[in-house]
């Protein structure tokens, strides 16, 4: 025969239900935040790490193309300037695209060094052999080219390190969501047990009280 549950037991049951629901709600909130953080990290891996790495590679490629042109140049090469301008325009677009991405403080510092190297390379290009001497001009071009290469390599290393950090954070978030999922299931089970106890109210109630108290 079902047993009447006292007001005290009902209050305890209501409190437990409130705690369980509060835990479920908090878990849902944390889950939503984790998913947002995971989406942000995955988006950043593409927009701020993968794409900029491609920009750096393209800048490097255009620099090598310009170097090849300079090695082949002659006093009678009238097409050299036009060919160099094509590469300069492409590099300018890549610079603009790269600067639109998120950069860490270390990346900003190294990026400025790269821009200085590119500016020095352009300055050496515009100087003539009569102004600096052909040998000095070649040395200036090579020195600025090597400086640009160093900055590009450093930026690529920073890109890889930041990408690895984002991947680690994303893995931690995914592991956390698994824990939250188990917690959610556990809370639902507890909620179901409380509901069953309240509905059935057997001779041995979930919150036992003195039989005389129940009769009163």
Image (cartoon, rainbow, N blue to C red):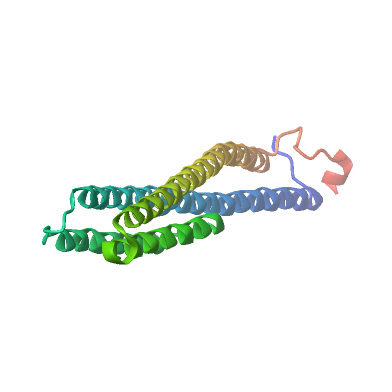
Determine whether, in the image, residue 24 is placed left or right of residue 52.
right
Determine whether, in the image, residue 84 is placed left or right of residue 47.
left
Residue 128 visible to the viewer: no
Asked if 121 appears above or below 210 in the picture, the reply is below
Asked if 156 appears above or below 112 in the picture, the reply is above
Q: Residue at x 32, y 53 (%)?
A: 135
Residue 112 visible to the viewer: yes
Q: Position of residue 50 (x, y in %)?
A: 37, 47
Q: Quadrant of residue 75?
A: bottom left
Q: Residue at x 65, y 49 (%)?
A: 23
Q: Position of residue 176 (x, y in %)?
A: 58, 40
Determine whether, in the image, residue 97 is placed left or right of residue 199.
left
Q: Quadrant of residue 95?
A: bottom left
Task: Report how many numbered discs are placed on residues in the image.
Answer: 0
Q: Position of residue 73 (x, y in %)?
A: 18, 53
Q: 105 and 132: which one is in front?
A: 132
Q: 114 and 39: which one is in front?
A: 114
Q: Position of residue 154 (x, y in %)?
A: 48, 47
Which quadrant is the N terminus positioned in? top right
Q: 185 and 168: which one is in front?
A: 168
Q: 161 and 72: which one is in front?
A: 72
């Amino acid at each position: 025969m079902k047993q009447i549950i006292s007001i005290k037991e009902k209050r305890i049951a209501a409190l437990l239900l409130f705690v369980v629901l509060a835990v479920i709600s908090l878990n849902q909130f944390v889950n939503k935040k984790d998913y947002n953080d995971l989406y942000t990290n995955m988006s950043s891996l593409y927009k701020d790490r993968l794409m900029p790495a491609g920009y750096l590679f393209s800048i490097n490629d255009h620099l090598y193309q310009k170097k090849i042109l300079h090695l082949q140049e002659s006093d009678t090469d009238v097409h050299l300037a036009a060919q160099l301008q094509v590469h300069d325009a492409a590099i300018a677009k890549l610079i603009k695209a790269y600067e639109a991405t998120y950069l860490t403080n270390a990346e900003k510092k190294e990026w400025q060094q790269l821009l200085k190297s590119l500016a020095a390379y352009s300055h050496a290009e515009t100087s003539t052999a009569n102004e600096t001497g052909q040998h000095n001009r070649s040395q200036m071009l090579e020195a600025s080219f090597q400086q640009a290469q160093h900055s590009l390599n450093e930026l690529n290393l920073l890109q890889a390190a930041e990408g690895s950090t984002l991947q680690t954070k994303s893995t931690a978030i995914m592991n956390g969501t698994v824990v939250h999922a188990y917690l959610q299931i556990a809370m639902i089970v507890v909620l179901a047990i409380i509901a069953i106890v309240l509905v059935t109210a057997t001779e041995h109630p979930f919150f036992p009280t003195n039989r005389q108290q129940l009769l009163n």
